[in-house]
Every structure is written in C-alpha cells, then in structure tokens.
Amino acid sequence: MAKAKAEQQQPLSFEEAIERLESIVSKLESGDVPLEAAIELFQEGMQLSQLCGAKLEQVEKKIEVLIETENGIQKKPFAAANEDKGE
C-alpha cells in the first residue's frame, strides 16, 4: 500500500508509464508469473494504459496545426486522424 500512495503523490511521466507498461507486458507474456501476481500486474497495466491515454488526450487538445493561407498563418485546432477520415 505504501508504494501505491507514493505513486499517487508523484504522478508518473508518460515515458515512465509506458516503460512500466512494457515491463508488465513482457512479464505477462513470459508466462512465468503466478496467477495472483498476473492479475495484479494486469490491473496495474490497465491503470497505466488509462493514464497514458489521458495524457495523450491532454496533449492532443493542446496541439494546434499551423496552416499557411493567403492571409498569413492561421491557427487551427488539432484534428485526430480518425476525425479527418470521417470514422
């Protein structure tokens, strides 16, 4: 429990979360993890995945695409790839 509280006080960076997530996936794929430990790792992995997704959404909202037009440069909100395709 002390580890979980420490992690809540100091949030992981995106890079740290991805690195930890990759480590969890590697352990789970090896198949050498006891069932209870595998469940805990899976739960932690899901939380990290959600954290990374939220961080990416925050960054996406901040990105602006600069488009050069006849009148100079205009700012346009970032559109996700699936929005451009109409999916």
Image (cartoon, rainbow, N blue to C red):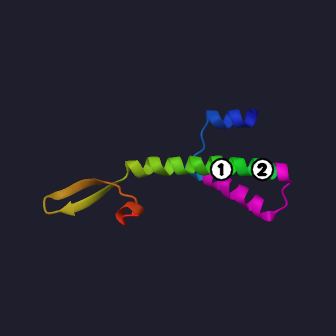
Where residue 29 appears, as percent x and y from the top left, is: 76, 63
On the image, which quarter does residue 18 sit in? bottom right
- Give me the residue at 79% from left, 53% from top: 38
Q: Please report whichever mark, 1 or 2, sits nearer to the chain's N-terminal start.
A: 2
- Give me the residue at 53% from left, 51% from top: 53
On the image, which quarter does residue 33 sit in? bottom right
Where residue 70 appears, as percent x and y from the top left, is: 13, 63
- Image-based side of 33 in relation to 57, left or right: right
| Membership of 75 in magenta stretch | no
Amino acid residing under circle 2: Ile
- Outermost residue to the bottom: 85
Q: Report the residue marked by disc 1.
A: 46
Task: Residue 39: give its label.
Answer: 2
Check the picture and name the quadrant holding the N terminus: top right
| Membership of 25 in magenta stretch | yes
The one nearer the camera, 40 or 74, is 40
- Image-based side of 72 in relation to 3, left or right: left
Tag 2's secondary structure? helix
Amino acid residing under circle 1: Met
Q: Which residues are magenta?
A: 16-36
Q: In this picture, is 3 found above or below 69?
A: above
Check the picture and name the quadrant holding the C terminus: bottom left
- Image-based side of 33 in relation to 71, left or right: right
On the image, which quarter does residue 26 sit in? bottom right
Where residue 79 appears, as percent x and y from the top left, is: 36, 57
**Dot 1, how many residues are within 10 Å of its Cα: few (below 14), some (14-19), or many (20+)?**
few
Q: Main secondary structure of the magenta part?
A: helix
Task: Residue 19: give its label.
Answer: none
The answer to whether residue 31 of the structure is visible from this angle is yes
The answer to whether residue 16 of the structure is visible from this angle is no
